[in-house]
Amino acid sequence: MPKVTRETALLIISDMVFRYIQSHGKPPNTIIAVGGTAMSLRGLRDESEDLDIFYPDAAFLSIARDLEAQSGFAIDVTSKNNLWGQIRVQDIEQDAEVLESLEIEGFTVDVAAISSETLFVIKSCSMRNKDRIDLPLLARATTPQDIISRAEFLLKTVETDANKEEMLANLLSEMQLAYLEPVNFEWFARSPEFVQEYSELINDQFQYTFTSKKQPTHPTTHPHIRRPKRP
């Protein structure tokens, strides 16, 4: 299937909105781009494998299937906030930022994209190669502090402590690679309770010790990063 550029994504979404208006007599609410489409809308990627959007009305999925068959583009519409695995983006509407407004049939429909921080957390936890490639691009659009703050919120939606710890270990490992620096105290400056909750894991997996509020200790000779220890 052909790649989906930013411009193509907006054209497909416009077509979907037009069909929704025709069948419902009213416009849909804000369309939220996720995955690679969100990155394209944010100017972080030139194109994506498919059009990837969130909309809570299942009717949008039916429209997407019809349009996919006619257009030849891959269209993925999800109506649930668990965009990947066990992580649920419960505040997806608040997290998303409106980037475009479409004027269709006399109505204005906003197109938003989920935040770079949410994308980084989700993609780092997926551990898929195609997602890991995106992480340095997302890192440039945000900060370690913002990613950690977002992870603190998102990991609360994961049911088991074991899964939370595994996801956090993956996240910190990928952040080290994306930012080319070891785990450090400044990353957690706005999340004191979060770092306290997982300090044992961080100390063990990354050999990092929170001994000072100003100057952390890194007991490692590696000049840049440390991969988490595996059992």
Image (tube, rainbow, N blue to C red):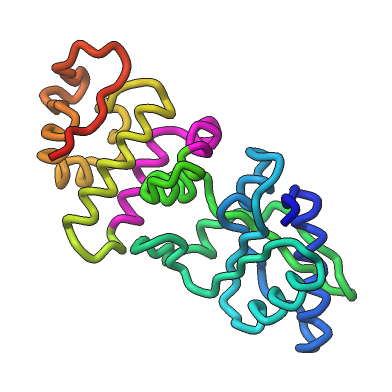
- Residue 84: x, y in percent? 43, 60
Farthest front residue in view: 1
Residue in the image at 43% along x and 29% along y:
178
Farthest right residue in view: 105
- Residue 73: x, y in percent? 74, 61
Q: Quadrant of residue 203?
A: top left
Q: Is residue 52 visible?
A: yes
Magenta stretch, overall SS? helix
Up-down relation of residue 20 to residue 43 (above or below): below
Up-down relation of residue 64 to residue 190 (above or below): below
Residue in the image at 17% along x and 57% along y:
161
Question: Residue 108 lies in magenta, yes or no?
Answer: no
Farthest bottom residue in view: 24
Given residues 2 and 115, the one toward you in this image is: 2
Residue in the image at 20% along x and 40% along y:
195
Q: In which quarter of the image is the C terminus?
A: top left
Residue in the image at 34% along x and 41% along y:
148
Q: Give the range drawn in magenta.
A: 133-155
- Residue 25: x, y in percent? 80, 88
Up-down relation of residue 29 to residue 85 (above or below): below
- Residue 217: x, y in percent? 16, 18
